[in-house]
Amino acid sequence: MNLKLLSKWKVAVSINLIIVLVTAPVVMNTDSDGLSITEEISAGSNPFNADTDGDGLSDYEEIEKYDTNPNAQDTDGDGLDDQQELKIRTDPTESDTDSDGLNDMKEQKIGTDARTADTDSDGLEDGREIRIGSDPFESDTDNDGLTDSYEVQLDKSLDSEVDPAKRTLLLEIDYDEGNKPTEETLNLVRETFENAPISNHNGEDGIDVVFVVDDELQLKEDVSLSDYKADDEEIYDRRNQGFYHVVIVDNVGGFRSLYGVTDYGINGVLVQDHGNPRVVASIMIHEIGHQLGLMPEDYSGIDSNIVPYDEYPSAMNYNSGLDSVKLSDGEGFDDWAHIRESMDENAPPVNGTEYKNQTDKS
């Protein structure tokens, strides 16, 4: 062979080999994951391992499809690896997919929906519920007829604390001239309910009582139930806001013997002021007991003289002498057990207020 031709051939072969060696890393896919060596080097992944971080997703899927980190099993650091997150349809690049204050792993452990900020749709986000101790699976944690969100909003607008994890009795109290309830009366009513043998979600016993005592009313002395029904919108400021309404007057319907009265289908009670704080408290407890579901059809000793007081020691018993401020915890009839089961069903309605189902993240 001509020496000049042989020399040219050797040069050509050498150039082609150099081209192959230089361009090979660009086009070669050494681990068959769909990424070239150059792409893997750029991403920092291992070009000889299709799943660098061993999370079940190929490097190609992580880089090109899910925008996750091929070098970390748990891209967002929430405790769930990327493949797990894709299976449960959370975002592997966001530690708190629904932005409710709980990371995805925490929600998995609790059982709440990591894709929905408010699992029970009560207006409070799951993270907020966990922080305040209410149940993210129950819209009314304490079964008092008031949603958790509403109770949290009330807590911000009232002087008294309202715990969504403990039953609460809301009482708006109005009165005619000279019949404002004394602190002794209010304390007796409060103590009766706060000492109730009723357990709550927060681990405490009892029912919290919130009083809102309004300004004096210009009511006529003799107020009948029909008068009240006709005028309650005029005096019942917190109608449809979860409050029971107590009106304290000189005479109930003109009868000194009629100590208190209420009726089905209303959330108000009329109480006669006898000038004795304990008697007024006893009448209030009796009428509120009716509002909470204690009715004559439930037990023969309610609103009757049939059962002696020592057999049924309750303010619901006409034999109480108008000075009992207790409800029975099982003697004769279990008033408190009945209230526990029916409190949410008998609660005044909540609608048309600014507090209804307002999402709270604070």
Image: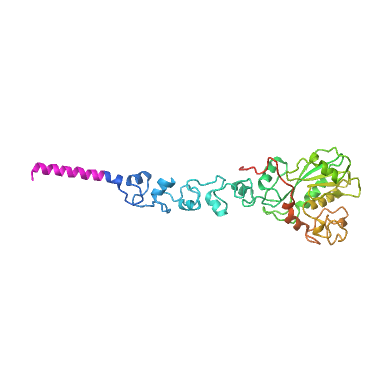
Q: Residue at x 86, y 57 (%)?
A: 304
- The image shows residue 34 at horizontal and vertical percentages of 35, 49
Q: Residue at x 81, y 58 (%)?
A: 297
Does 362 appear in magenta? no
Residue placed most toward the observer, 324 or 217: 217
Q: Is residue 65 left or right of residue 188?
A: left
Which residues are the magenta region? 1-22
- The image shows residue 260 at horizontal and vertical percentages of 86, 49
Q: Quadrant of residue 303?
A: bottom right
Q: Quadrant of residue 314?
A: bottom right
Q: Is residue 51 left or right of residue 206?
A: left
Residue placed most toward the observer, 312 or 351: 351
Residue placed most toward the observer, 255 or 69: 255
User: In which quadrant will I find the C terminus?
Assistant: top right
Count of labels in the image? 0
Regarding residue 182, the answer to whether it shows in the image is: no
